[in-house]
Image (cartoon, rainbow, N blue to C red):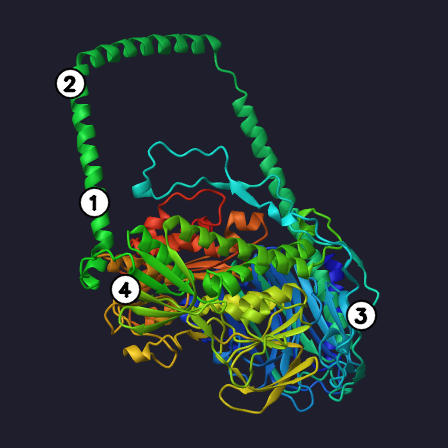
Amino acid sequence: MLTKLVVAIAALAATVAQAETIFRETFDDADWETRWVASTWKPQAEVGKFAQVTGKHYTNEGDQAIKTSEDARFYALSAKFDKPLNNKGKDLYLSYLVQHEQKLDCGGAYIKLLSADVDQKNFGGDSPYAVMFGPDICGSTKKTHAILNYARPGEDAVNMDHKDTIRTESDTDAHLYSFVLKQDNTYDVKIDGKSVKAGELVKGWPFQPEKQIKDPSQSKPADWVDAKQIPDPEEKKPAGWDDTPKTIPDPDAEKPEDWDDEDDGEWEPAMIENPEYKGEWNPKMIDNPEYKGEWEHPLIDNPDYFDDETMYNVAKNVGAVGFELWQVKSGSLFDDILVTDSEEEFNAHEEAVLAKTEAMKEKKQQIQDEEKAEAEAKAKEDEKEDAEEVDEDEVDETEEETKEEAKEDAEEVAAEEEEVKDEKKVEKDELKLDQLRDSRMLRSLTSVSRRSVAMRSAAPMTARTFSSSSEYDVVVIGGGPGGYVAAIKAAQLGLKTACIESRGKLGGTCLNVGCIPSKALLHSTHLLHTAQHDFKSYGIDAPGVKANFPQMMKAKEKAVKTLTGGIEMLFKKNKVTYIKGFGKVSAQGEVSVALTDNKGNETVKAKNIIIATGSEVTPLPPVPVDNEAGKIIDSTGALVLKRVPEHLVVVGAGVIGLELGSVYKRLGSKVTVVEFQDAACPGMDKECVKEFTKLLKKQGLDFKFGTKVTASEVNGDVVKLTTEAAKGGDEASIECDTVLVATGRRAYTAGLGLEQMGIQTDKLGRVEVDDAFRTQVPGIFAIGDVIKGAMLAHKAEEEGIACVENIAGKHGHVNYGAIPGVIYTFPEFASVGKTEEELKAEGIEYNVGKFPMMANSRARTVAEADGLVKVLSDKKTDKMLGVHIIASNAGEMIAEGVIALEYGASSEDIARTCHAHPTLSEALKEACLGAFDKPINF
C-alpha cells in the first residue's frame, strides 16, 4: 500500500508541473494560518477554532490536516486564490478530503467557492458564493449539497440546490468528495472516486423554466362534469333513520347520594354512545352518465423559456475557498483541497488521495484489532481472578459467626425499643401534629404569594349584588375561547349570565375556522407524510399510501362539530343563557341583539358587559381575498379548499402561514412563503427562528424574505403576484394557482356601539383597558383579541376568568410573562418568556443553556431528533427568564417552562428535578443544567 501511495504522489507531482493549479491546500506546514483567515462574523463565545492535527489514522507523521475542535460552535475560515477564476470555456474540478473522527450527528462539512471580493473577516452564512458542495448531516437528514449560484437572463442570481437528495457518507472513515462541472453542461458528483450523481445540469437544477406552461387564456368549461360517480338519485333514506339519537343518557347512572340540587344544580346522567344509532345515511354511489373525464389544461410554449449554452459558467469571479459550518459535535477533519481546470491534475489528485484513504482504513482496522485484542485479554484476566476459590471452611465459619452476631443484635434492639415505646409514641404523635400544621401553613402562604401581585395590581371592585330575574349580572358578547370561558366561570361564581354569539356556533375563530381545524389537518398530513416517507425505515412496508383529501376535510369537520356541541352542553350544565344573534352595546347596561334567522331584535339588560368578539383577518389591499373563488384565500378559505393546490404562495411567515403552508406541502403542493420581514416568526428568539427556518427549508418550503407584494392578478387558473424588495428595488413576479394571505389579524370591534358609548379604539381596533379589564365606561369590560397582547386562545381564556373574578369581588390576575406561544408545524416551535434580543435590549445579564434534541434518547429512538431546547436565566439569581423549544412535542414540553416562570423557579430547580427516562422532557432538564452548570449528555 505504501509503495502504491508513493507512486501515486510522484505521478501527481509530475502532472502538477505541467498544469496550472488554481488552488491547492494540504495544511502540512506551520504557516497555513497565514493563508487562511478566520471570520469574526459571530460572537467569540459562539465560534470554534480549527486545529492543525495529524489525523489519528494518518500513516505519515508529516501529513497534517485541520479539524473542528469545539462542540456546538460555528466555524468560518477562508483562503484567497492567487488570481480570480472564471470557468467560462473551462471544465471545473473541486475536490477535498473529509473525515468525521467523532461521528457527526448534526452539522455541515461542506466547502464553498467564494467571490474574489469576499470580506474574509466577515465571511458568514450570508456571504455570496458560486458553489457550495459537501456533506450536511443532522438527524435523519443525510445529504451531499451541490448548490450553484445561477442567474436567469434579466434576473438576479439565486442559490439553487440539486433537485434530488444526493447521498453522503456518515461513518468515521475518510472520504474524498469531488464535484465536476463540464463545458458541455454536464456534471458529476463523486465520493471516493465513484460517481453518485451525474447528468445534464438542466435536469439536475431548476435553471430553466418549464418549456411549456398551462395556457392562461384557457380554463375548464363551466359545464364540464368531472365527478366520476354520483349518489343514486333513486335511492331514498329509510323512514325513521334519523330518529335514533347518537347518544343517550346512561341508563345505569345513579344520582349521587350527596348531590344537592340547590348547590350543584339539576342532576343529569352522563351521555353514552347509543348502541342502536345507525350513523349518517348515505345513498350508494353510481356511475355518472354525464362524466366527461378529467379535464386537461391545454399547454402552450413558455415565453420565458430560454436556452443557455453556458450554464456551467457559475464561477465568473471566484477568488477564494472557505468553510462556513455549524457542528454540534466537533472532530471533522479537512485536507487535500484542490480547485483546478485540468482533468489530468484532478485524476492524479484523486488517485493519490484515494491511496491515502485506503492506507488510513488499514491503520484504523489495525487500531481496532489491537483494542479488541486488549479488551479480550483483560476479560480473560478478570474471569481468572473471579474464578479463584476461597477456602470453604473459612466461609462456613464466617457465615456462622455473622448469623450469631446478627441474632444477638436483634435481641438487643428489640429490648431497647420496648423500653422507650411509650415515649416514642407521644413524640411521634406530637411530630405528626406539627407537620400537619406546617403543611397547612405552607399551602396558605403559597396561596397568598400566588395572588399577592393580583391584589396589588387590580383596583378594588364594588361588592357584587345579585340581579333581578329580568336582568343579568354578566352579559358576554362573543362566544369564542375568551367569551365562553368567561360566561361559564361567571355562572360558576353565582352570577346570572348570558352569552351572545352571532355565528350560530360557539367556539369562535379558534374552534370553527382556526386552531382546531388546522390542527386536525396538521395531524392528518403528518401521519400521511410519516407513512409515505418514514415507515420503510421503521420496518413497515406500506406501499401506495396516498391522501384522501375529502375524507381529511370530513374528519376535520367532525372534530369541530363535536367540540362546538360540547360547549353548548357546558352552557346548559352551568346555566348560561345562550342568545344567538349580533350584540351591540346600545346604552349603559343594555345590549341590543339582532337575533339570527330573522327573529327580530331583543334588548338584554346587564350590570356588567364583557366585550369578547375576537379578531378578523387583516386585509392586504394588493391581494384581495375571495374565498368563494378559491384563488386568493385567507386562513378560513384554506380550511375548506376542494382541491390541493399545485403551487401555493403564502403571504406572511407567521404562525398561520407556516402551519397551513406545512399542511399543503405534505399534501404535495409546491409552497413559496413571501415575508416582508427579514426572517420568519417575528418576535420569537432569533437563534431559534434561524434553526426553525432551516428545518422548514429542508422540508421543501421556499422562503422569500425581505419581500413585499405590490399587486395581484387572477387570470383563469393562474394567479400572478408582483413583488419587490421590502426596502425598494426591481419588480419581480410569482405565478401560482392559489395564494394564501396570512399577514395577521385585527380586533373585531366594528359595529359594537363602542364609540357611541365613549370607548375609543386604536388603529387596529383594539380597546384600552386597565389591570382589571375595565374600559373607560363603568360596567363595560374587554378581553382577548380586542385588547392589546398576543392573539392567543389560551390568553383570552385566562383573561376571561380573571375578568369575571374581578367582577365577582375577587382578585383575578393574568401573568403575561408566562403566556406560551406554539407553532404546530413538525417539529413544533414553542416559546415562553423573554428572548435573547429582549434581554439584551433591557440590559439584563443572563446565562444560556442549550441542548439539541439529537442528543435526547427518546428523540433519537423515535427518529424525531430535529430541534433544540434553549433556556435563559438571570446571571446573578439563576431565575429562569425564557424557554424556547423546537421539538416534535414542543407544545406539550413548554408547559414545564410555563410553570417554572409562573412560580419563579431557577434553572437549577428544574435541573435537579427528576425527569422520567427516556422522555423528550429530559432535554429541558439538560438545557437547565447547561444554564447553571454543564449538561450531562452533551
Which mark sits nearer the N-terminus, 3 or 4? 3
Q: CA distance from mark 1 to mark 3?
A: 71 Å
Q: Residue at x 75, y 89 (%)?
A: 303
Q: Label 4 belongs to which residue?
A: 608
> Which amino acid type corresponds to the residue marked 3 in the rendered image?
Glu
Q: Residue at x 65, y 51 (%)?
A: 280
> Which amino acid type corresponds to the residue marked 4 in the rendered image?
Asn
The correct choice, above or below, for 227 with respect to 180 in the image is above
Which mark sits nearer the N-terminus, 3 or 2? 3
Residue 444 marker: 1
Q: Label 3 belongs to which residue?
A: 294
> Which amino acid type corresponds to the residue marked 2 in the rendered image?
Glu
> Which amino acid type corresponds to the residue marked 1 in the rendered image?
Ser
Residue 423 marker: 2
Q: CA distance from mark 1 to mark 2?
A: 32 Å
Which mark sits nearer the N-terminus, 4 or 2? 2
Task: Say what secondary structure mark 3 lies in.
Answer: loop
Residue 162 or residue 462, whichever sits in front = 462
Report the side of 239 relative to 262 (left or right). Answer: right
Q: Residue 910: x percent and y percent?
A: 36, 50
Task: Say what secondary structure mark 1 lies in.
Answer: helix
Residue 247 or residue 614, whichever sits in front = 247
Q: CA distance from mark 3 to mark 2?
A: 93 Å
Instruction: Single out the mark in the foreground, 4 or 1.
Output: 4
Report the side of 164 relative to 458 (left or right). Answer: right
Q: CA distance from mark 3 to mark 4?
A: 59 Å
Residue 375 marker: none
Instruction: Single out the mark in the foreground, 3 or 2.
Output: 3
